[in-house]
Amino acid sequence: MSVLRPFEATDMFKFNNVNLDIWTETYNIGFYLHYLSRWPDLCCVQEAPSGRMMGYVIGKAEGQATEWHGHVTAITVAPEYRRLSLARKMMSLLELVSDETYRGFFVDLYVRCNNFIAIEMYEGMGYSVYRRVREYYGNLGVGKGGRDEEDAFDMRKPLSRDSARRSVRSNGRDIIVSAHDVS
């Protein structure tokens, strides 16, 4: 049985099997260490009994007033461990901490618009598209359908503090903003 545990700095020595994936954003060591020192309760690892890393999530708390929220900076599961609900378990923990500890209004994340499997997974977890962010991941040129494949959907899930559900909208796919408009 696998274990969901806090992400530790030494985990960076054993996450290549998870990070070497086309959908996974990787960062420099200082970036991970900053998250681990600032928001350790929003960073966790799913570990196999053998000690092999199966996946991880790193997040943070940010924003002001009704925009105060938990943010999923990265979530990824190694290909050989996908479709076991590991991402759901890690996301549930991040959502719980964002709700109960940080008292956020919502949790948000960014996902490539062409990552259909992830979008479907997030929608199944209760997230919805809040807006489309043009060239969030850079600009690789126009892809299928005349849209830049490096656009991102800003997806959000309201938490208990957002009882009026102001952090979500039904027409989010129609709202398009520049990457410069997103902090």
Image (cartoon, rainbow, N blue to C red):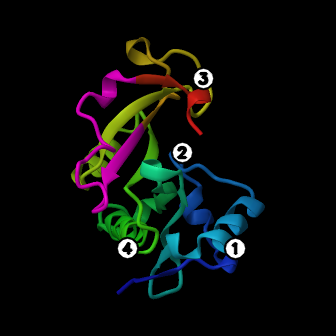
Amino acid type, residue under disc 4 in the picture: Glu
Of marks 1 and 4, the one in the foreground: 4
Q: Please identify the residue farthest to the top as the structure is shown.
A: 146
Indicate whether residue 171 is drawn in magenta: yes
Q: Residue at x 37, y 14 (%)?
A: 145
Task: Answer with left or right where residue 183 lies relative to residue 116.
Answer: right
Q: Secondary structure at mark 3?
A: loop
Q: Decide which of tag 3 and tag 2 comes sooner along the chain.
A: 2
Q: Secondary structure at mark 1?
A: helix
Of marks 3 and 4, the one in the foreground: 4
Of marks 4 and 2, the one in the foreground: 4
Looking at the rendering, the stretch of residues picked out in magenta corresponds to 154-175
Residue beneath disc 3: 140
Indicate whether residue 3 is drawn in magenta: no
Residue beneath disc 2: 22
Q: Decide which of tag 1 and tag 4 comes sooner along the chain.
A: 1
Q: Decide which of tag 3 and tag 4 comes sooner along the chain.
A: 4
